[in-house]
Structures are given as C-alpha cells and as structure tokens.
C-alpha cells in the first residue's frame, strides 16, 4: 500500500513539475519572440523573476548537499563550489562534445525546450557530472580522516583553489577563458527534480541508521569511534554523496548560463553556500531550503526596489554572519526541521 | 648561476612578506586556537594605512629613506588598533563557543573588510578615500629613493628589497625580544601553553590576547606597506590570496610556533619563486595550496610544530 501511495505521489510530483515547466518555458518563449510583450507588466515581471526561480533551485541543491557534509556529519567544508564546478565542466563537456553527434543539430532549439533526445543526454550528463564530482569528493574525504575542524576547512579551501588552477590549464574546455557555448538545456523541470531528489536523499539519510552515525561523528568523533562507528567509511560517504549532488547542481548551472568559468570553483562561491547553511542552521534541511530561497530572492528584491543598494549586499552578508554567530550561533532553525505537522500542532494548542 | 641568485633574492623578498604575515596567524592561533581569517585583510588595511600616512605626512614624493619609517610606523599603529577592535567586538564573546563558530565569525570579519573596503568613498582627506572604492589605487613609490644596487655580476637589488630585508630583520629580532624577555611576552607564552591555568595564575588573559592581536596586526601592516611599495597597485581584495598563502606558511612551519612561521614564510616564498621561475608561472597559485594539502596530510604539525595528543 505504502509503495503504491509513494508511486502515485511521485507521479503527481513529476506531473506538477512538468506542468509548471511547460507553462514557464512557453511564457519565456513568448517574451523572447515578441518584444512588445515587455510593455505588459506581468510579462516584464515574469522575465525578471523566472530565471531567479531557476537560480533558487540550484542554491537549494547546493545548500542541502553541503548540509549533509557540514551539518549532519560536522565536517566543515569550504570547497563545495569546487565540486559544483567539476560537475558543471564534466556535464558541459558531455553535451558539447557528444550532443551534436548523438542527438543531432539543435542550434535552433529555444532555451529550456530542447528535443527529447537532448534532454535524455542532459540527464545522463548531469549524473555523469555528479559522479565525477563525487570521485573528487572521495579523494577529499580521505584526508578528512586525519584532519579536524578548522584544518579540514583550510584543506577543502585549498582544494577548491587547486581545482580552479587545474581547470584553467585544461584547454579543450576553454582554459582560463571559461567554457563557452554550452547548450541552454536547463529548465524548471530538471532544476527542481534535482533539488527535490537532493532534499529527499539527504532527509532519508538523516533519518536512517547512517544518519545517526553521521550525527554521532559530528557530536564527538572519539566517542563515536568507541561506540563502533566506522569513521572512515562515514566521513567519506558524506563527502561522496554531498559532492554528487553538488556536481549535478553545477551541471544545471553550466547549461543555464551557457558557460562556466574556472572562478566558479573558487573560495567566494563556496563561502556563499556556507552562509546559506549556517544561516538556516547546520543540520536543518528545511532551514537550508528556506535560507537558500531567502538569500537568492533578497538581493533580487533589493535590486528591483533600490538598485543602488546592490553594492552593500556582500557587506550585509558579512555582518549577517558575524551577528548571527554572536547572537544565534546555531542558525535560525538550529538543528530542528520545520514541518507542516509540527506547525499544525502548534496552531491547535 | 646569476639567474639563480636573482631568483634567490626575489624569493627571500617574497618570503619576508609571507613570514611577517604568518607571524600574526601563528601568534593568534597560539593564544586562541583560532585561524584568524581576517588577518590577510589586516595586511590589506596596512597597505591603505601606509597610503593614508604618506598622504597625511605629505611624503608621497619625498624620495628619502627618512620618510619611509614614519609611514611604516603609522600604518603599524593604525592596524594594531584595528586588530584590537576586531578581537574586542567580534571574537571575545566567542572564546568559549565551539571553534567552528569562531572560524565562521572570522570569515565574516574578512568578508566585511574586503567588501566594506570596496564601498564607494564617503570621506575624502587630502586625496585619500575612505572607504577605498573598488578600483585599484597606485601606492606612492616616490617615498623611497629610486636607488637600484647592481653588483658587478649583474645582480640587482632594488631599494624596496633592501628596505624589506632590513625592516623584516629588525621586526623579527624585536618580536623575539618581546616574546622572550618581556613580562608581556612571558604572559603570551603562558596563555598559549594553557589559557585557563594562566588565568588562574593571575595573568590578565584578556589584555594579553589584545596585545597579541595588536602585535600580529602591526607586523601584517608593515608587510602591507612593504608589499605595496614593491607592487604599487593596491585594492581591497589584495589580502585574500596573500593572506591565504601566509597562512599556508604558518602551517608549513608549524602553527603556533613563532620560529616556524618565519621559516615557513621563507620556504614558501622561495619555493613559489623558484617553481614560477623555472617551471611555469601560471601554476603559481596551485603551489602554495598543493604544499598545504600535502603537509596537512603527511605532517599536520608542520616542520617545527610539536604534536598534541587528544585526551578523552
């Protein structure tokens, strides 16, 4: 019964994603093909906010996957963007070099509305990008066995910078100029399918035996080991799974922008993901999701209301981080989850 | 051979900058067990404070050795105050908090200085803008005489390089004297050995930690001025990479160890210069971080550090 219910739920979810995607893509094409629609407020607003909605989905994926490493397993990583960049480059390389050969010419396809063959290849490239990223995640997970806390943070940071320099030297994917000409296949459906898959995967891990083992490592490594938790396996596992989803987010980003730069692996990108996780509360998945939405929408709202305040965005982030650590170091949600059931219970009382 | 010697001089010059900054990282880590991420930005502030001092003292075109030292001293004083303010307002409350919270705060302070520094200027004093604005500024190299010492074999040593070696040497000898011979230096070592026990022995730990920040920030400021005199463009993000590399130097030498930071700085500076000079300069940034990852995996305590066993 439960399986049937879940299957039906999954199908409904897919249908909803598909419907929203169809509507959004059609709207986008309408706006692109008829510039006169820009004069209608609704269409104008749509063309501003639709890309923001897609961007939000990417940050949700990045934040929730980092939350698995930072929040649940307690391994402070400052190199999450590097995994995303690796995934982005790998997925981009697949669609750029294999796409025209396998799926035919698609130069006339509208952004987000490629033929089915391309979408299939895109899905495969996202997964492949995720796998390449998680292979690197495995390599990074290994030193985390010997390093704790701030040392691990520095090593992951250094790893991100090394990845950036290495990418700058790979000429087939553009070297230091960045990888351009990636087909714009990313659409609402794929972005949110990956985001939901990430949320479900991390939630299920958190609620399983494995999740409890990760929490034990976060709370006290020595005690966890004494209780028989295999530290090696779980730490590497957290890195492998977290970097897999980050790699998929990177693939989505590359096919959304149509290009990806080596700087995407750098320190500043990683910090932004960390800010989201810390703000939402490390360990809280709903916290990460809401913080990702808030921190993606906030600068856009700021830009549309008072464009001159845009330059204060990073300063505000910094102050937010400092004040948060002084006033509420556990983040807005602490380790807790926001649930519909919990809210209802509170309202009833 | 001549190229080698020239690279050696350049490497030592770069290493001196790294060493001066690394000392601040290592001393703060010693007393607080905190990686002070904002330290690289204190280095950046040092360069701007030097610019400010040169403008205020009106020595931007003086071309004399006498004018350089007040500029450096003033920059050191300004940054010492900034460093103490950061400790007082951002870090002090977090001393008992988990170490990661302090690290996140340090990242926050670093971002604040970097992006706060890029804000458009609001105050303007004699052509010095505050905040600094996002564009790069040119540091007045005219403070120094344009001397260039060239030996018979064709080796060249610029005035900045001579100044850097002299100032670094003086500061290191001075720091050594402070740490080894003065009361506050003994107190610093006591706090770094065991903060609680030091407090029980009547050492005013708050004041010692403030002093450590002042000392570290002053050294970073001196490095900032010397660095800016050499590469005359400065910008609010200049501290990011130099700071990270100086941190690598501190880890390389053994974090918490003062001689280690000096050694680590010079080793890193030499390695970077030689690899960039003989192999490929575009890999420059990867070298420092490659060394970092390697050293942390192979010998996390660094060259001169001692290992601490975790007790349960």
Image (cartoon, coloured by chain):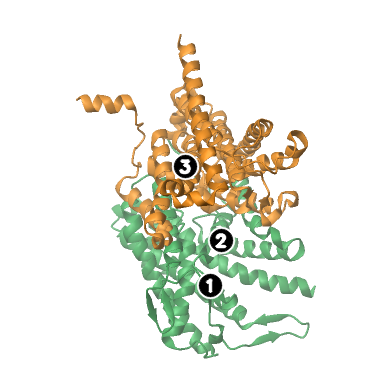
Chain colours: A orange, B green
> In the image, which disc is placed on residue B241?
2
**To which residue does mark 3 refer?**
A53
Q: Quick check: can you spot residue B95?
A: no
Q: Position of residue A163 (x, y in %)?
A: 64, 49
Q: Chain of mark 2?
A: B
Which label sits on residue B289?
none
Q: Which quarter shows the C terminus of chain A? A: top left
The answer to whether A274 is drawn above or below residue B87 in the figure is: above
**Which one is closest to the eye, mark 2 or mark 3?**
3
Q: Nearer the viewer, mark 2 or mark 1?
A: 1
Crowd around label 1: few <14 · some 14–19 · many ≥20 (10 Å): some
The reply to whether label 1 and label 3 mark residues of one chain is: no
Alpha carbons under labels 2 and 3: distance apart: 33 Å
Secondary element at image label 2? helix
Residue B145 horizontal side relative to residue B156, left or right: left
> In which quadrant of the rendered view does residue A335 lie?
top left
Q: Disc 1 designates what residue? A: B136
Q: Which x, y percent locates residue B159?
A: 61, 83
Q: Report the mark closest to the observer, 1 or 3.
A: 3
Q: Is residue B266 above or below residue A111?
A: below
Say if residue A130 shows up in the picture: yes
User: What chain does mark 1 sit on?
Assistant: B
């Amino acid at each position: 019964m439960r399986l049937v219910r879940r299957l039906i739920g999954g199908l409904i979810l897919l249908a909803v994603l598909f419907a929203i995607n169809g509507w959004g893509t059609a709207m986008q094409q309408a706006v692109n093909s008829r510039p006169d629609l820009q004069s209608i407020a609704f269409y104008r607003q749509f063309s501003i906010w639709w890309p923001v909605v897609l961007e939000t989905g990417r940050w949700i994926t990045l934040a929730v996957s980092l939350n698995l490493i930072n929040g649940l397993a307690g391994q402070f990583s400052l190199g999450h963007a590097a995994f995303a960049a690796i995934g982005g480059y790998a997925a981009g390389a697949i669609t750029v070099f294999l796409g025209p050969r396998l799926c035919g010419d698609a130069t006339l396809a509208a952004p987000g509305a490629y033929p089915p063959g391309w979408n299939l290849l895109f899905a495969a490239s996202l997964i492949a990008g995720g796998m390449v990223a998680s292979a690197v995640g495995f390599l990074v997970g290994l030193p985390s066995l010997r390093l704790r806390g701030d040392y691990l943070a520095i090593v992951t940071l250094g790893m991100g910078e090394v990845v950036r320099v290495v990418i700058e030297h790979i000429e087939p994917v553009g070297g230091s100029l960045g990888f351009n000409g990636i087909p714009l296949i990313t659409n609402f459906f794929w972005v949110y399918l990956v985001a939901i898959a990430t949320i479900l995967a991390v939630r299920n891990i958190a609620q399983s035996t494995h999740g409890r083992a990760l929490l034990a490592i976060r709370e006290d490594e020595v005690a966890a080991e004494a209780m028989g938790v295999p530290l090696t396996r779980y730490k590497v596992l957290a890195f492998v799974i977290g970097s897999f989803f980050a790699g998929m987010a990177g693939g989505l980003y590359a096919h959304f922008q149509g290009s990806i730069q080596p700087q995407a692996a750098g320190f500043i990108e990683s910090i932004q993901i960390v800010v989201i996780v810390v703000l939402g509360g490390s360990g809280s998945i709903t916290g990460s999701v809401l913080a990702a939405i808030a921190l993606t929408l906030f600068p856009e709202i700021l830009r549309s209301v008072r464009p001159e305040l845009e330059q204060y965005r990073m300063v505000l982030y910094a102050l937010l981080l400092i004040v948060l650590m002084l006033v509420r170091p556990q983040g807005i949600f602490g380790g807790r989850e926001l649930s519909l059931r919990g809210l209802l219970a509170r309202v009833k009382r | 051979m001549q190229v080698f010697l020239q690279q050696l001089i350049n490497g030592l010059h770069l290493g001196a900058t790294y060493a001066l900054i690394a000392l601040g990282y290592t001393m703060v880590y010693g007393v607080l067990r905190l990686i002070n991420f904002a330290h690289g930005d204190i280095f950046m502030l040092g360069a701007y404070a030097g610019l400010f001092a040169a403008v205020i003292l009106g020595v931007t075109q003086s071309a004399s050795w006498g004018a350089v030292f007040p500029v450096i001293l003033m920059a050191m004083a300004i940054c010492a105050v900034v460093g103490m303010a950061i400790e007082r307002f951002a870090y002090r409350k977090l001393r008992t908090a988990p170490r990661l919270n302090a690290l996140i705060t340090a990242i926050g302070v670093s971002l604040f200085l970097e992006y706060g520094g890029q804000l458009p200027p609001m105050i303007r004093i004699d052509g010095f803008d505050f905040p600094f604005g996002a564009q790069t500024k040119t540091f007045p190299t005219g403070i120094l005489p344009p001397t260039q010492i060239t030996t018979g074999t064709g080796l060249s040593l610029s005035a900045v390089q001579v100044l850097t070696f002299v100032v670094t040497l003086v500061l290191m000898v001075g720091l050594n004297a402070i740490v080894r011979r003065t009361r506050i230096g003994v107190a610093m070592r006591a706090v770094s050995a065991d903060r609680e026990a030091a407090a029980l022995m009547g050492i005013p730990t708050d004041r010692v930690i403030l002093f450590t920040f002042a000392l570290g920030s002053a050294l970073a400021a001196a490095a900032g001025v010397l660095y800016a005199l050499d590469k005359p463009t400065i910008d609010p993000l200049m501290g990011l990479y130099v700071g990270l590399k100086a941190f690598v130097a501190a880890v390389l030498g053994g974090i918490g160890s003062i001689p280690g930071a000096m050694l680590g700085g010079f080793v890193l500076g030499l390695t970077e210069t030689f690899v960039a000079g003989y192999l490929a300069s575009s890999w420059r940034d990867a070298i420092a971080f490659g060394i970092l990852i390697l050293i942390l995996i192979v010998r996390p305590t660094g060259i001169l550090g001692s290992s601490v066993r975790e007790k349960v």
